[in-house]
Amino acid sequence: MAIAALEVRGLSKSFGANIVLDDISLEVAKSEMVFILGPSGSGKSTFLRCCNRLEEPDSGEILLNGESLTQKNVNLNKAREKIGMVFQAFNLYPHLSVEKNVSLALRKVRGFGTEKANEVARSALDKVGLADKYRSYPSELSGGQQQRVAIARAMALEPQVMLFDEPTSALDPELVGDVLEVMRDMKAAGMTMLVVSHEMNFAREAADRVIFIDNGSIIEEGPPEKIFTAPANPRTKSFLARVSGN
Amino acid sequence: MSQWERFSDTFFNRAVIIQYLPDIYHGIWITLELSILIVIFGILLGTCLAVLRVYKILPLSFCIIVFADVFRALPPLVLILIAFFGLPSAGIYLSSFFVLFIILTLVLAAFSEEIVWAGLTSVDTGQWKAARSTGLSLNQTLIWIILPQAFRLAIPPLTNRAIAITKMTALGTVIGVPDILNQATTAQSFSGNASPLMIAAIIYVIIFLPLVIASRWLEEKFSWRKA
């Protein structure tokens, strides 16, 4: 069997007495798009942040293409290059131009020269449809454009896995489509993606697998067709009923 | 003698001005030299202290906070007098110039530390997360992402504080630093005429008004449009 692109084994995390993640295990195959659903406060975002150790898990193991990220001597900065992350609030650097937002890590982490970094940054921006915005500042862009810059910033480092933390939740409805379009392209190009989102229609159409997290545990998983039409767990059922407004 | 003649003779006496202008002129350089040194070292030291707090080494952070609070609480004149008149009893002899420099630098550092720290903490934590997620180290994130944004927030209060502290170089007059005010008060007591003090006031305005205007300009330049 092929090694999973991302493997999580027995991940647990508590904040004080509050158990946020309780022994979660998950394998994401190469080029697979896995959607994570669950009520707010269920630990989805914490789970995602644990995957690149922005949040330090209490216990458990994370493997990227078979290489552990949780061993003591692992170079975390090197490892994080290989895991792209996109945030709900975009988190672009407001003092840098769009081009520099993307090229900074290429220069400082990859060690590219300015010329090469700019070239790679521009081609990443071209891919998300922002070829005319190199010199703009984040504040001059719409939310949808900002999120696409954030995607380009992560993609420029050629990650092996992309994590999306509610990428469209902060966007006006008419801007959501552009971002989803970019994610669709990424999937078509074979990117491995782990997505926390409430875009049910998109999940149904694009996800290979949907997992449902509640109270820090995976309580159901399966292909989107099955989860959305015939959820087995009553909690999944009631969650889906609530978000679809029925 | 008319009222006006008496007024101009007291405050703008030509003969007195011409006689003492060279001394006051010498004082200008002392004041400028001190001001520039204090601003550079004070802000540099304050920034370093604020940055050290980012590493969350608790005993160190505690010491920095105590330093900042004490030096912000005490009147600088008290510190200057203690250092200049107290330290020699302990066998430490410092020149009046050096005492003024070191005390005002420490006071400015204390204020700068608090201002820069406030700037650092008000940068959104998402900036840290985004930068670290691309593989930037803590130091790289600090240098390229957090500090530039913190400084934009800190520049207006920092310039105001720098101006306030450099004006305090006039306190040096009590320990005999030959700055503008010291030269002027000496001249005033020799001549029995207030004109040197007026000249000193005018020179302070000439030196500090451009700084006040520059701070206004900096404030506008660095307040960048937020989304």
Image (spheres, coloured by chain):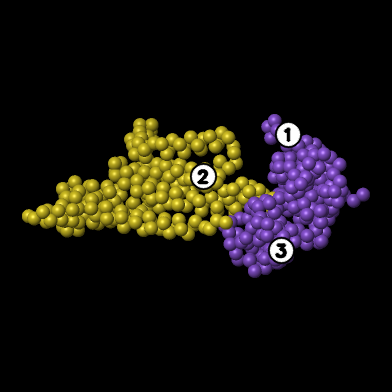
Chain colours: A purple, B yellow
Dot 2: within a 10 Å radius of its alpha carbon, few (fewer than 14), some, or many (20 or more) residues?
Answer: some
Residue at the location (66% across, 55% down)?
A171
Dot 1: within a 10 Å radius of its alpha carbon, few (fewer than 14), some, or many (20 or more) residues?
Answer: some
Residue linked to disc 3: A128
Question: Comparing marks 2 and 3, which lies closer to the viewer?
Answer: 3
Spot occupied by residue A51 in the image (x, y as percentages of width and height): 75, 45
> Is mark 2 in CB contact (under 8 Å) with mark 3?
no
Q: Is residue A216 above or below residue A230?
A: above
**Residues at marks 1 and 3 on the same chain:** yes
The residue tagged with tag 1: helix, strand or loop?
strand
Q: Give me the chain letter of mark 2.
A: B
Q: Give me the chain letter of mark 3.
A: A
Gap in Å between the C-alphas at discs 1 and 3?
Answer: 38 Å
The residue tagged with tag 2: helix, strand or loop?
helix
Q: Give me the chain letter of mark 1.
A: A
Residue linked to disc 1: A19
Evaluate whether residue A176 shows in this view: yes
Quadrant location of the C terminus of chain B in the rendered image: bottom right
Residue at the location (23% across, 56% down)?
B21
The residue tagged with tag 3: helix, strand or loop?
loop
Marks counted in the figure total 3
**Residues at marks 2 and 3 on the same chain:** no
> Is mark 1 in CB contact (under 8 Å) with mark 3?
no
Residue sitting nearer the eye, B67 or A11: A11
Gap in Å between the C-alphas at discs 2 and 3?
Answer: 36 Å
Residue linked to disc 2: B118
The amino acid pointed to by label 2 is Ala
Spot occupied by residue A113 in the image (x, y as percentages of width and height): 67, 63
The amino acid pointed to by label 1 is Ile
Q: Is residue A55 above or below residue B136?
A: above
Q: Earlier in the sequence, mark 1 or mark 3?
A: 1
Spot occupied by residue B220 in the image (x, y as percentages of width and height): 46, 58
